[in-house]
Amino acid sequence: MDEAGFAPSKPAERKISNPLWLNAEITFRCPLHCVFCYNPVDYARSGPELSTEDWLRVFREARELGAVQLGISGGEPLMRDDVEVMVAEAHRLGYYTNLLTSGIGLTEKRIAAFKEGGLDQIQLSFQDSTRELNDFLSSTRTFDLKSKVAKLIKQYEYPMVLNVVLHRLNIDHIQAILDMAEAMGVEHVELANTQYYSWALINRDQLIPSREQLVRAEEITNQFRARMGNRCKVYFVVPDYYATRPKACMNGWGSVFLNIASDGLALPCHEARQLPGITFPNVRDHDVRWIWHESPGFNAYRGDEWMKEPCRSCPEKTKDFGGCRCQAYMLTGDATNTDPVCDLSPNHHLITDVVEKAQVPGQPVKVHPIVFRDDKNSRKLSEKGQPETTPVG
Amino acid sequence: MSEARIAPEAVIELERQYRFQWEPAQQSHVLLYPEGMIKLSGSAGEIMKCVDGQTTAAGIVEKLERAFPGNDLRKDVMEFLEVAYGRGWIRTKQAG
């Protein structure tokens, strides 16, 4: 009568596991300009978007490999007018289909069509519980619109995840954020502390919270959890900069997660596009089975043959897989290094230096103005290559 | 969660956000929910197959005892339903 909980994580097995998660970044277009967006900073130079037919084929092929969860995300996925077709086909194939949206463009007509097509749940992002900060952080005036959309989602009886990315500028509003979630009647709240990739890495000094802020936020979250029980489940994603062991990024490279970007590039995570020396496959050229099992990109960091010390001889390598390859690359210049979040890494100071600076109360000193994710900045960053705060060494 | 009590006459249904299905790639029944999957054991899968929003807890026991004759399944089934209820996978439906 036992049940196995989350299925993945059997690192001892040498055979390649099935993908469980297909994340379809169907467009990089977005009406918001969030300062912590994890889309590539050079998205402006990514190729043309996949066609509807391409996407449906990818859904079918990934489902045949065993993927059960489908995220339709972006950018803002609702910038495309064929999401209805995708939802219906995904449902027919047996996916649990999740729409990850800012809510912009989610009209009642579309919500009704998605319901009819079999959309399983909607993840709505809010940047903050207050209009002022929500609108500032996304560089738009969207708070009232999002509130309206949240009501519509409940009216159509969708399970709903409220996603709020936490950071230095909004984490102290956590009580108000949770109150907002309760008032909306959402079943899941995802309080995702910013992870420092892409646009968030550029804005890292402005976004990283102090330890005191974090502790307080977690306390308030735990009180809320105790009070709400099963009525509302709260995920609190701890920022890995405050950890001493790295996260088991993506549950291991090419282990459960398959990301397809709007231009068809197949990636083991949202960020891997930036890694040097790897040519990732494109779904325009290859089928998903080949991509997952055979492509050099997806095999690059499977297993542990690629590891260096201190990971190679570390007993914890089967648990955290040496952390995140992209973070290792972004911060140390070598993707095969230990993720510097690990305090066994000789580069751990790259993390602690940043954390230490974040303990100074108030606004951080000596930073460039906050950089919004928009086409103009992306074009600039495309020309420059790497964001300027990256200490490649 | 150990306080949860399911009366034998309570009609059991799946919580709205969960979906129950057979997964060929896993060779097992699973519960899908936002961003997650619970892989069920064989017996848990058999019980969940009977959760249809119309059958009572006692009815589920009866059905399973018919399908697997010669076994007294009441205790195991009720225990599983309590666990599933405690974890929010299922809920009891108001009569009528």
Image (spheres, grey):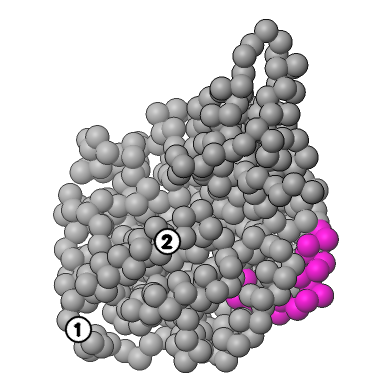
Residue A377, relative to residue A254: is it above or below? below
Can residue A242 be seen here? The reply is yes
Q: Is residue A167 magenta?
A: no
Q: Which residue is at a point 78% across and 56% down the rendered structure image?
A: A118
User: The magenta stretch spans which residues?
Assistant: A101-117
Residue found at x 31% / y 89% = A368
Horizontal relation, residue A258 to residue A301: left or right: right
Residue A257 image position (x, y, % from top left): 54, 49
Q: Are marks 1 and 2 in contact (CB under 8 Å)?
A: no
* Identity of the residue drawn at 66% across and 76% down: A151
Q: What amino acid type should be assigned to the residue bearing mark 2?
A: Arg
Label 2 belongs to which residue?
A227
Q: Nearer the viewer, residue B17 or A26?
A: B17
Q: Amino acid at mark 1?
A: Pro
Q: Residue furthest top?
A: B70
Q: Is residue A280 visible?
A: no
Give the letter of the chain under mark 1.
A
The vertical placement of B3 against B45, above or below, is below
Which residue is label 1 attached to?
A: A361
* Element carrying mark 2: helix
**Nearer to the camera, A165 or A294:** A165
Q: Please identify the quarter of the rendering in which residue A167 is found.
A: bottom left
